[in-house]
Amino acid sequence: MPPPRITLTFDNGPHERVTPLVLDVLKQHDVLGTFFMLGKYLDQPFARPLMQRAVQEGALAWQPHVFP
């Protein structure tokens, strides 16, 4: 029997302060996550670098969640 699994999802980001902390913890524990972003953050200067970092570190997906 395979070991139990859970799926980690993070909604309503990327957040300038919180998302980097989440990425740090995921990387520290070699865990993947799926991120759902708010469209209103796409033009913020912090958004693209955070999304790129998440993809480089193995995030399963960045999915648009809500567009204004």
Image (cartoon, rainbow, N blue to C red):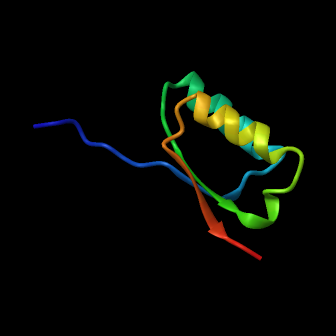
Return the x and y of residue 34 as percentages of the image width and height.
52, 48
Q: Report the residue at 84% width, 46% height from top.
A: 16
Return the x and y of residue 40 as percentages of the image width and height.
80, 66
Relative to 67, is 32 on the left or the right?
left
Return the x and y of residue 56 as percentages of the image width and height.
60, 28
- Give the position of the N terminus as an image quadrant: top left
Q: Is residue 15 above or below residue 12?
A: above
Q: Give the total of numbered labels.
A: 0
Return the x and y of residue 48 as percentages of the image width and height.
77, 43
Q: Going by the picture, which residue comes out furthest to the bottom?
A: 68
Nearer to the camera, 12 or 28: 12
Q: Report the residue at 31% width, 43% height from top.
A: 5
- Give the position of the C terminus as an image quadrant: bottom right
- Quadrant of the rendered image containing residue 13: bottom right
Nearer to the camera, 11 or 25: 11
Q: Going by the picture, which residue comes out furthest to the left?
A: 1
Q: Report the residue at 74% width, 39% height from top.
A: 50
